[in-house]
Amino acid sequence: MNTPLITSQNYRTASINNWQSDMSYLYQLKNEKRDPIRMWLRAVSDASSVGEAVRKDEFGEAMEKLSHTFAWIFTTTGKLYATRFDGQPALTDMDGVPLQSATDILFAKYPGICPYCGKTETCHCPVLRKTIAKETKVERRNRIREARKRVVMLNNVPNSLPEIAYMFDRIYGEAHYEVGLDIITFHFLEEVGEVAWCLTTLYDGAKSTADPVLLTTQLAEEIADTIAWGFAIVNKLASLTSQNLILKALELPSTGVQVSDSQLNYNLLPDWLWHIYTGPSHDELRCPKCMRRPCQC
């Protein structure tokens, strides 16, 4: 793939699948000999740096490290599409169907709803905790199946990073309103660790869990949870400031973000990714170290 999918003209509207494809191409030479475990360890490393930055209230640093973590999420899952465990695809949905894109992974668990309380807006998990605890996993998965059918039927699947950020804010924004950034980051780090556990367990030869579900399904769901909590951090960082103060607080160049007084900046993640992975005179994603495409480091 020589033609860039992400450019200055479309980076805010480009699909999450295009971001994944372009990131995978950018680092294809470096990652061709790495297995997914080694690649995910890089995600673990950058995610830990997100936690450190949040602890120090260094929001710009947190957003930068989170952007690098998303890059590793994209490239690792891209590698997993071609990975097999005992001849079976590495990523499957709850019905055992192979997942072959970032959109597939995300909406297999988050089809426009909270997978636990089922709300499309304003997650009710904090107030329905006892009811949810009594629900069987079969009931929960049937609800997700029905939600996925509705999303596909209405052709209403969010594709771009801002659209996905808006979806998660619509579902979880109120539930996360009084939750500190540190708590949200703890959840994110937990999910990053869960993905690492699934990968190492699969490489050890295990096929299922006590759930019981295929471990490849659990792996896909944990990656989806990692993405969801990553967007929760993005949205929380955006909400910590108001109006155009976000430019100063997050140290983003003034040419990037446009923020209104009354809404979150759902462009925050693509703006940071574009800021980090392009050079001053380029119109395509490049390695921020060697400034080449693909990376020659």
Image (cartoon, rainbow, N blue to C red):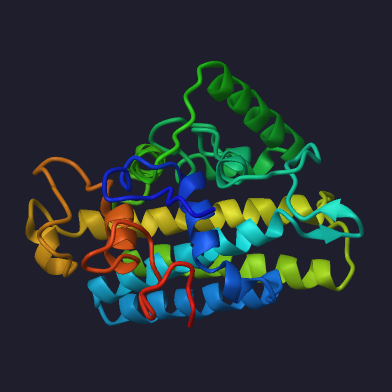
Expressed as whole percent of the image width and height from the top left, the position of residue 25 reads 53, 60
Q: Closer to the camera, 225 or 76?
A: 76
Quadrant in the rendering for residue 141: top right
Horizontal arrangement in the rendering, residue 88 relative to residue 56 (left or right): right
Horizontal arrangement in the rendering, residue 23 relative to residue 82 (left or right): left
Horizontal arrangement in the rendering, residue 257 relative to residue 184 (left or right): left
Residue sitting at 38 percent across and 50 percent down? 6
Horizontal arrangement in the rendering, residue 270 relative to residue 198 (left or right): left
Residue sitting at 64 percent across and 66 percent down? 194
Q: Is 44 rendered above or below residue 194?
A: below
Quadrant in the rendering for residue 174: top left
Q: Closer to the camera, 127 or 64?
A: 64
Q: Is 12 rendered above or below residue 49?
A: above
Q: Is 2 rendered above or below residue 155?
A: below
Expressed as whole percent of the image width and height from the top left, the position of residue 253 reads 14, 64
Q: Closer to the camera, 207 or 72?
A: 72
Q: Is residue 179 visible?
A: no
Expressed as whole percent of the image width and height from the top left, the position of residue 110 reads 55, 40
Residue sitting at 49 percent across and 65 percent down? 26
